[in-house]
Amino acid sequence: MIEIDNEFVVVCDIDDTLVMWNDEYKQPHAGAMAFLDPYDGSTNYLTPHQKHIDLLRKFKGRGMCVIIWSAAGTQWAKSVINTLGLADFVDVIMTKPSKYIDDLVRAEDILGSRIYLK
């Protein structure tokens, strides 16, 4: 069992949050980095979203517990985090939840405010 003993937890998604996809993801292009997909061995050329990367580092620097999740699975999330050099800023990597059970009706009531910087 994983126990997080921190009152301040931030959760961050991977795709189109820490790395941006576009139609050129199969080809190297300006600003893109190569990311290895651990599930099929293919390479995806994605653009790091620097504002969110900087925010994640700031949150960790302020003592927050940082959880990374991805609907694409934990191995993909781990590959992206390692390629971006963020392993020291992440406490937990997990698959994005597909369901939750709680007495509160809306996810916003549980997760707090959503942050997305353009």
Image (tube, rainbow, N blue to C red):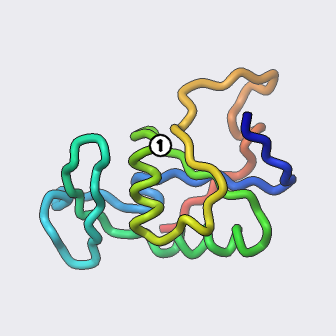
Q: Is mark 1 on a helix, strand or loop?
A: helix
Q: Residue at x 72, y 75 (%)?
A: 61
- Circle 1 packing at 10 Å, graded few (<14), some (14-19), many (20+), is some
Tell me if 30 is positioned left or right of 84 in this view: left
Specify the quadrant of the image occupied by residue 111: top right
Q: Left or right of 57: which side holds 36?
A: left
**Residue corresponding to mark 1:** 74
Q: Which of 16 and 76 is in front in this view?
A: 76
Quarter of the picture containing the N terminus is: top right
Q: Residue at x 39, y 69 (%)?
A: 48
Q: Position of residue 35 (x, y in %)?
A: 30, 61
- The residue depicted at 13 percent of the width and 64 percent of the height is 27
Residue lying at the far front in this picture: please name it: 1
Residue 75 lies, with reference to residue 86, above or below; the image says: above
Q: Where is residue 83 in the image (x, y as percent from the top left)?
A: 39, 66
Instruction: Kindly indicate the quadrant of the structure image that contains residue 65.
Output: bottom right
Count of numbered labels shown in the rendering: 1
Q: Which residue is drawn at 60% across and 68% down?
A: 88
Q: Where is residue 50 in the image (x, y as percent from the top left)?
A: 47, 75
Q: Give the amino acid at mark 1.
A: Thr
Name the spot of residue 40 as percent of width and height, x first. 22, 42
Residue at far left of view: 27
- In front of the other: 47 or 80: 80
Up-down relation of residue 116 to residue 61 (above or below): above
Q: Can you say whether 1 is above or below 114 in the image?
A: above
Compare residues 5 and 98 and report the one nearer the observer.
5
